[in-house]
Image (cartoon, rainbow, N blue to C red):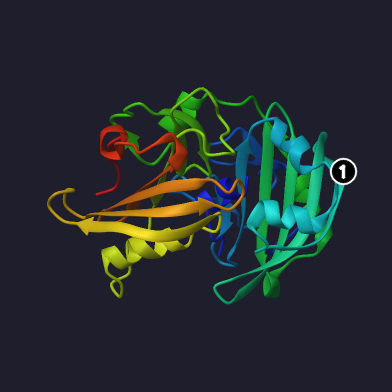
Amino acid sequence: MCRILQAVVILLLLVGSAPAEEARQSIPGTTVSVVPLQGYLPAGNGLTALLNRRTGGGVVVMSFPPQAFDELAKDDDVARLSKVLSQGAITLDDAEITTLGGHDALLMHGQQRIEGVDYRKWIALLRADRTILLNVQVPESRAPDDATVMAMLNSVEIGPEPTIDERVAQLPFKLTEKGSFRPVMVLAGTTLLMTIGDKDVVPAMEQPILVLTFSPTPVPDTISQKSFALRGLSAQKSLKVGKLISESEGKALGPNVVEVVAEAEDLKSGADVNLIEWVHYFSKAICSFRGLRGARRGTMSWARCAPSMTGSS
């Protein structure tokens, strides 16, 4: 789950009055709704989140397989939970099994420092026909009292799960070819996980994995496209990136495309991994493809299997 959460890092840059029932708001791209704090609106850009742009707070919703709840909620060991959720980046104060909106839930309180800003966090994992994660993130200086946030979390309603095809259709990019890959999961409305093989979960890296992510933020003018791609590769906390095999850009790959190939080790399973990243830069967005494959399964023609994708121009 750590890899999944990190594939979709969303910096939700909450204060408000008690929610009113008539203000119920659906989370875009999900069947989850809450009665939010005042000032919360859909985040846009395909994100499964509500944001308060004035205060810099927000709530993001993610969906996981049903078994994820029992895997995480087996105890209230905050050290274990912090490692599983964030490789220790989130400091958890407590965790308890409770009920939210009529659903069994694991509720956690904590803090996280992001780009120099301290955030207070409420993380709720709910059992439904799948596992739902709600991550509330509030700048510490603007944080409301716990009762106010709990009123919002207790208002949660969860509708039937959409099909994977329905979720793929809502992504902010369009797949024009999947090659040998099949979609497995959509995260936060912006990230698609794909694999080749029968398993949906591949903890030992026994199947190829392809992660496609859309970011509505262009590369800063202060950094080159190649440097940006290398920075993204080294930011993978679930992997220990080793030898850089190759890096290339230019006409051979298409305009505004960078390719980086490296050897890595999966920190959870210890498996050797072949890692490749393509980053396609648009004028107003970035689309990245990150492919993983266990080395013991041999090499792979990523170019042949990689899907083509259309994003913002």
Label 1: how many residues lie within 10 Å, few (<14), some (14-19) or many (20+)?
A: few
Seen in the picture, residue 229 relative to 290 is either above or below; the reply is below
Left or right, residue 68 beside residue 8 = right
Spot occupied by residue 146 in the image (x, y as percentages of width and height): 81, 60
Q: Amino acid at mark 1?
A: Thr
Give the image quarter of residue 110: bottom right
Seen in the picture, residue 257 relative to 188 is either above or below; the reply is below
Looking at the rendered structure, the secondary structure element under dot 1 is strand
Pick whichever, 161 or 68, lies toward us: 68
Instruction: Residue lying at the far left in this picture: please name it.
Output: 251
The residue drawn where x is 27% and y is 64% is: 225
Spot occupied by residue 179 in the image (x, y as percentages of width and height): 31, 28
Pick whichever, 33 or 120, lies toward us: 120
The residue drawn where x is 40% and y is 65% is: 231
Spot occupied by residue 154 in the image (x, y as percentages of width and height): 79, 44
Q: Which residue is mark 1?
A: 98
The residue drawn where x is 83% and y is 41% is: 74
Residue 294, visible in the rendered structure? no
The residue drawn where x is 78% and y is 59% is: 79
Q: How many marks?
A: 1
Spot occupied by residue 121 in the image (x, y as percentages of width and height): 71, 61
Pick whichever, 307 or 13, lies toward us: 307
Left or right, residue 302 beside residue 19 = left
Give the image quarter of residue 311: top left
Image quarter (top left, top right, bottom left or bottom right) of the N terminus: top right
Left or right, residue 199 beside residue 226 = right
Residue 205, visible in the rendered structure? yes
